[in-house]
């Protein structure tokens, strides 16, 4: 029979974290992406609208892949190196 006495089960991961083989989160919330890039929400949405930062939507949530942040940084680093 199923024992229902242990109700103190904690989730393995926070809802916004997707982990594979010990890696960090692959998708960031808008706020987490702002924190990573050190920009405000308005600037982040500007980067999204102008196609400089790729995102995905899951339902009504807009999430930023970590790879998109790395690509954005690398592109700006190359551009700065040419200046």
Image (spheres, rainbow, N blue to C red):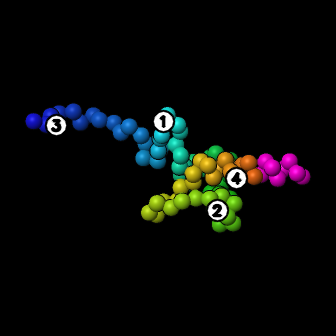
* Residue 65 included in the magenta stretch of the image: no
> Which badge, 2 or 4, is on the more N-terminal residue?
2
Is residue 77 found left or right of 60 in the rendered image? Answer: right
The numbered dot on residue 48 is 2
Residue 6 horizontal side relative to residue 60, left or right: left
Magenta part of the chain = 76-83
Q: Residues within 10 Å of mark 2 (few under 14, many from 20)?
A: some
Along the line of sight, the residue nearer the viewer: 26 or 30? 26
Report the predominant secondary structure element of the magenta stretch.
Answer: helix
Binning the other alpha carbons within 10 Å of mark 3 as few (below 14), some (14 to 19) or many (20 upward) gives few
Sequence order check: which comes first, mark 3 or mark 2?
A: 3
Question: Which residue shows up at 63% across the image and 52% down it?
Answer: 68
Mark before the other along the chain sequence, 1 or 2: 1
Which percent across, then down, holds residue 66?
59, 48
Residue 4, labelled with which disc?
3
The residue lying furthest to the bottom in this view is 49
Residue nearest the observer in this picture, 78 or 36: 78
Question: Would you call the spot at circle 4 few (<14 residues within 10 Å), some (14-19), or many (20 or more)?
Answer: some
Q: Which badge, 3 or 4, comes first in the chain's sequence?
A: 3
Give the labeled residue for mark 1.
21
Q: Between label 3 and label 4, give the one nearer the viewer.
A: 4
Question: At 33% across and 36% down in the image, what residue appears?
Answer: 10
Say which element carries label 4.
Answer: helix
Q: Select label 2 or label 4 by which is in front.
A: 4
The residue positioned farthest toward the front in the image shown: 21
Residue drawn at the location 86% of the way across and 48% of the way down: 81
Q: Residues within 10 Å of mark 1 (few under 14, many from 20)?
A: few
Residue annotated with mark 4: 72
SS category of the residue bearing label 2: helix
State the residue in front, 60 or 81. Answer: 81
């Amino acid at each position: 029979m199923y024992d229902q006495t242990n109700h103190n089960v904690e989730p393995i991961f926070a809802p916004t974290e997707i982990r594979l083989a010990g890696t960090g989160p692959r998708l960031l919330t808008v706020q987490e992406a702002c924190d990573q890039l050190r920009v405000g929400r308005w600037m982040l949405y500007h980067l999204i609208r102008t196609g400089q930062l790729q995102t995905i939507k899951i339902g009504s949530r807009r999430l930023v892949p970590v790879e998109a942040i790395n690509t954005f940084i690398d592109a700006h680093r190359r551009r700065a190196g040419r200046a």
